[in-house]
Image (tube, grey):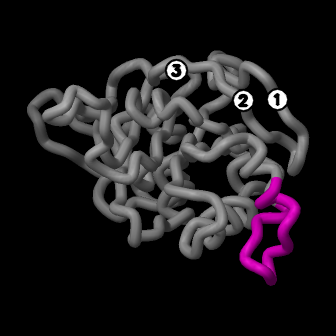
Amino acid sequence: MSLVGKKAPLFKAQAVVNGGEFAEDFSLEQYIGKKDVVFFFYPKDFTFVCPTELHAFQEKLGEFEKRNVAVVACSTDTEQSHWGWLQVPKSQGGIKGITYPIVADTTKTISMNFDVLFGEYELDDENRLVANGPMIAFRGLYLIDKKGVVRHQLINDLPLGRNVDEAIRMVDALQFNEEHGEVCPANWTKGDAAMVASHDGVASYLSQN
């Protein structure tokens, strides 16, 4: 299911913010009208690929902040698990030093509504509720604009880590389009020429500078 062009699903959940503070009823609604949001899911705390991604987003957090973009992470682990992982140094496989919010999707409804939940609940032959998968989140990433609309969506399988620079590039493309109205061609990066389509359908390049 693609959420692009649709309002991002609403939720309220527990989260850990500022590297170790618990927050109740955390919601992306706080950013509407104020900031774009990069909201990303990862499979599990205390794993191998996940800390590399979380640290990569932290290392580029200043780049997101100067673009007025909030970065928010989410997994199906509990807020206590998030907090515990935040106490473990990076050298020992932990995520100590991460300061952006990490949402606890303990009910798995956030992952389900964003269509990144790996597995489904179903009834077996004896009418018992069972899960047909690990019930954790794929590596989903959503760029949500200030109106709360999803403008970019990327979902990777569990072993495939993401490129944080690509997330920044998509932010730049969105903000350039919103400011100038032009479209961004393949492999566009900030500072490149964009494109404007004339009324006869012929596209021409327009330099950002």
Which of marks 1 and 3 precedes in the sequence?
1
The answer, for residue 194, to whether it is visible in the render is: no
Asked if the residues shown at circle 1 and circle 2 are in contact, with their CB atoms under 8 angstroms apart, the answer is yes
Secondary structure under the numbered disc 3 in the rendered image: loop
Q: Nearer the viewer, residue 87 or 55?
A: 87
Say the numbered circle drawn on residue 69: none
Which residue is tagged 1?
23
Magenta-colored span: 84-97
Secondary structure under the numbered disc 2 in the rendered image: strand
- Location of residue 8 by image quarter: top left
Three-letter code for the amino acid on which mark 2 is drawn: Gln
Residue 93 counted in the magenta span: yes
Label 3, residues with CA under 10 Å away: few <14, some 14-19, many ≥20: many
Give the Cα separation between the discs numbered 3 and 1.
21 Å
Which residue is tagged 2?
14
- Location of residue 150 by image quarter: top left
Q: Position of residue 41 (x, y in %)?
A: 52, 48
Residue 186 counted in the magenta span: no
Which of marks 2 and 1 precedes in the sequence?
2
The answer, for residue 64, to whether it is visible in the render is: yes
Label 2, residues with CA under 10 Å away: few <14, some 14-19, many ≥20: some
Give the Cα separation between the discs numbered 3 and 2.
20 Å
Tag count in the figure? 3
Question: At 55% across and 65% down in the image, what residue appears?
Answer: 165
User: Does 60 sit left or right of 161 as displayed?
Assistant: right
Asked if the residues shown at circle 3 and circle 2 are in contact, with their CB atoms under 8 angstroms apart, the answer is no
Say the numbered circle drawn on residue 148: 3
Question: At 34% across and 48% down in the image, what residue appears?
Answer: 118
